[in-house]
Image (tube, rainbow, N blue to C red):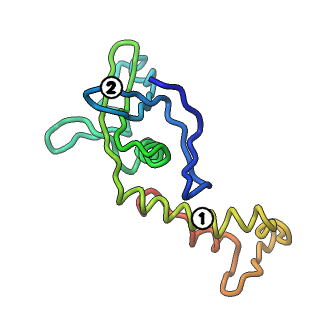
């Protein structure tokens, strides 16, 4: 395993991630390693199948819920490092579980599109000119943009819930 820091995506410098580790072996090649310590299940006597971010697949094996933030996390880690495989490791003092995932290009493309919109229409205008906070009071929150009733409307046009991606 190798140490690494925050990996910025060159094409989208407003996006990046910091995987826990990057492992490499002769049989599997390079892969992201993301570790979650699920102490709560050990303390409460639960099993991995009771975790909110895991579901059972058609064949009965445990898989990650693709709408959960951990799925987003491993996908952006693969995107930011250029590595197409990830091991998601759940650890407790009593047991561990390793789930292998591959980069989902369609998912990543949608995620980049939504993040790009949010960055260009909300973050960048605020960073450059305090577009949303400069002249707006808490009472009115009126935007100076044509065809926008409120500042929050501009942000809502750019952001997406996990179900949209």
Quadrant of res 122: bottom right
On screen, residue 86 above or below 92: below
Residue 102 location, quadrant:
top left
Question: What is the secondary structure assignment of the residue under circle 2?
Answer: strand
Given residues 123 and 156, the one toward you in this image is 123
Is label 1 in a helix, a strand or a loop? helix
> Which of the two marks, 2 or 1, is nearer to us in this view?
2
What residue is disc 1 on? 118
**Where in the figure is residue 157, as x and y percent of width and height?**
57, 72
118 or 17: which is nearer to us? 17
Q: In which quarter of the image is the N terminus?
A: top left
Name the residue nearer the viewer: 49 or 127.
Answer: 127
Q: Residue at the left extreme?
A: 59
Residue 164 in which image quadrant: bottom left
Q: Distance between the residues labelled 2 and 1?
A: 38 Å
- At x 61% / y 54%, what residue is drawn? 13
Query: Does 117 sit left or right of 123 as displayed?
Result: left
Q: Dot 2 corresponds to which residue?
A: 25
First reached walking from the N terminus: tag 2 or tag 1: 2
């Amino acid at each position: 395993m190798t140490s690494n820091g925050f990996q910025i995506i060159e094409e989208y410098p407003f996006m990046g991630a910091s995987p826990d580790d990057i492992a490499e072996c002769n049989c599997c090649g390079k892969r992201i390693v993301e570790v979650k310590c699920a102490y709560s299940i050990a303390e409460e006597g639960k099993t991995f199948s009771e975790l909110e971010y895991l579901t059972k697949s058609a064949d009965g094996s445990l898989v990650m819920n693709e709408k959960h933030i951990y799925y987003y996390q491993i996908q952006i880690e693969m995107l930011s490092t250029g590595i197409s495989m990830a091991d998601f490791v759940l650890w407790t003092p009593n047991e561990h579980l390793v789930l292998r995932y591959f980069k989902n290009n369609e998912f990543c493309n949608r995620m980049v599109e939504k993040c790009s919109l949010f960055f260009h229409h909300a973050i960048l205008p605020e960073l450059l000119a305090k577009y949303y906070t400069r002249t707006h009071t808490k009472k009115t929150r009126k935007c100076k943009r044509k065809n926008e009733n409120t500042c929050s409307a501009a942000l809502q046009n750019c952001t997406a819930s996990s179900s949209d991606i």
